[in-house]
Amino acid sequence: MQSGHPHAPTSTACHVPFPSSTSPAARADGLLATFADDALVNDQLRDYWGKPAIREWAARDIIGERLTMRVVKIVEHYGHFIVTANIDGNYDKRGLPDPLVLAFYFSAYGERIIQLIILRNQSDI
């Protein structure tokens, strides 16, 4: 990970942009390799359980939308990691702030992500 956090599992590094020459299938494979077989991703209040569901989510919402992220902060909290990043891509940006800032809450077991919850936190609430 760009931050160089010494205790962050290497699996959290999956969310940096892939080279543009990498095929969508290779991007999906690289992303999925970081997740446990029975992992959970919650994005936009929807659950995606297991690699087949995570693959569909990633193909549609990450790779399909050409998402990029610039990590601005990493916090380790009792073995879990919160990665805050500015997000860009080809998604519908109507009504969203610029930059769009999302928080990625990672739980890992060994070197695999077992849970990823993605939230748009609002600091003014």
Image (tube, rainbow, N blue to C red):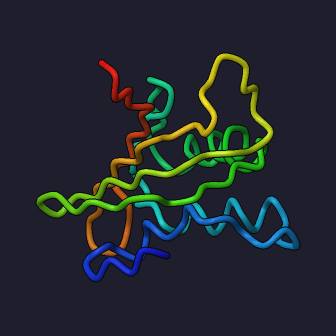
Quarter of the figure that contains the C terminus:
top left
The front one of 71 and 16 is: 71
- In the image, what residue occupies the spot 63% across and 34% down? 98
- In the image, what residue occupies the spot 28% across and 73% down? 110
- In the image, what residue occupies the spot 39% across and 55% down? 83
Q: Give above or below for 51 relative to 16.
A: above
Which residue, as the protein is rendered here, is positioned at the far right? 21
Q: Where is residue 39 in the image (x, y as percent from the top left)?
A: 39, 50
Q: Where is residue 80 in the image (x, y as percent from the top left)?
A: 22, 58
Label total for image: 0
Q: Where is residue 3 in the image (x, y as percent from the top left)?
A: 42, 74
**40 left or right, relative to 7:** right
**110 left or right, relative to 118:** left
The front one of 83 and 109 is: 83
- In the image, what residue occupies the spot 48% across and 67% down? 34
The front one of 122 and 42 is: 122
